[in-house]
Image (tube, helix red, strand yellow):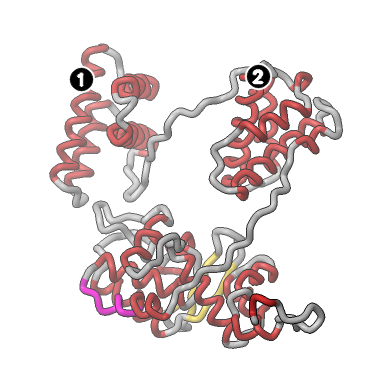
Amino acid sequence: MEIDEAINSINEFYRHNGYSRTRQFTIRRIGKEVLAHFNQTERKYSKSEVYKWFALKEKQYKSQYSILIRYSHYLHLIIELEETGLIEIGKIHPYKRSVAKPTSPTWKHILNEYLRELTLESKAKSTISFSRRACTKFILYLETHNCLNPESLDKDICHRFEEESAGHNTLNGKRAYQYRIRLFIRYLQRKNLVPKTMEYAVKTHYRIPHKNVTILNDVQKTEVRSARKSDSSYKNRAYAMATLAMYLGLRSIDIVNLKFTDIDWFENSVKVIQQKTKKGLILPLIPSVGNAIADYMLNHRPISNSQFVFVSFHAPYGSLCTKSVCYDSSKRLINERPPGQPSGMHIMRRTLASDLLKHHVNHNLVSSFLGHSKVESIDPYLNIDCERMVECSLSLGAIGFPEVFR
């Protein structure tokens, strides 16, 4: 496909799929810039030449992130047309900022081999991505301290990395990074590149303060339920999502990825494969949930060929793609939120778990209903069961009655 044909195809796509006039104007303007680039350079259309054009835009708008997103999106559209001849509706092409990478050939080779091993072990993409970030941060620190190969690695530099590498808001975050780095050093040990005890130089145990689980109070529950009478399409979609979290306990990522084929209206059930545990889950489609979804689909859902139940209200009305929409939806429903209280649909999932436990539902059943991979995952919810927590209190007879209570 020639460059002028690709540009015309993109313009037609935006014209016939409900995009605003402003968006169409932006796409046409970027198309003219692409065409002008090829006319000025007098080169034939190729993927490498398109990347060169985008590299020029990165230099020109290096401090204007929002503009680079548009150019990045257009770049992917051209490549998608060349490879498939089609534009996939609802597909998002985010602009990824360039990140620092190891410069030492030795460390680059070792890191690539380590990540390749994780891939062969069938680790999740998120696990591999997190390991790449943690190990890259560690290696960049080593390079700045002239440690350019495993032979130069010692315990002292590992200790200094822990003390000097800030940037973690929580101890949980620091522990997660340190643990990934320890696994990387363990890999170096297996390859006989460092001493066998080097991994113990990386501290992974921190005293993490335990926080009480937060749930919705009665006022907030009433606020959520009152949204079912709203005429706002956004609030109606938010309420339908909330019922799946508050009555069925689904996670945000599973709500966003819910498809029409997952709902059986004849058997009154919802069948999903959980994104987190990769395990199947069959839940009852109770009237409150079914009515909320039906109202959204019949009266508020845009006309779209998407297989997903919840779609965007903006052209081309495709998948929501990320679970951040659930976070925004929860803020539309709950106004009375104390400062510092967590947001998102997950608080509704926690509310369901606490309500089931208060009504003396078996722990194993609650854990199974929520799709936990381990029964112990239900333990944090036991702390907010005040009635039965009182029964666990110890007598003060052995130490006497404290003065402060007299």
Q: Which mark is residue 228?
A: none
Is label 2 in a helix, a strand or a loop? loop
The residue lying toward the viewer, choosing from 17 and 405, is 405
The residue lying toward the viewer, choosing from 205 and 91, is 205
Which three-letter amino acid code belongs to the residue tagged 1? Ala
Q: Residues within 10 Å of mark 2 (few under 14, many from 20)?
A: few
Q: Establish if 201 lies above or below 302.
A: above
Earlier residue among tags 2 and 1: 1
Q: Residues within 10 Å of mark 1 (few under 14, many from 20)?
A: few
Measured from the top left, where is residue 76 in percent x and y?
Answer: 36, 35
Q: Say left or right for 131 vs 151.
A: left
- Which residue is depicted at the point 74% across and 37% down? 202
Q: Nearer the viewer, mark 2 or mark 1?
A: 2
Is 275 magenta? The answer is: no
Q: Establish if 272 lies above or below 25.
A: below
- Which residue is depicted at the point 70% across and 49% down? 206
Residue 151, by quadrant, is: top right
Q: How many marks?
A: 2
Whether residue 257 can be seen here: no
Which residue has dot 2 on it? Answer: 145
Which residue has dot 1 on it? Answer: 36
Measured from the top left, where is residue 87 in percent x and y?
Answer: 32, 43
The residue stretch that appears in magenta: 225-231
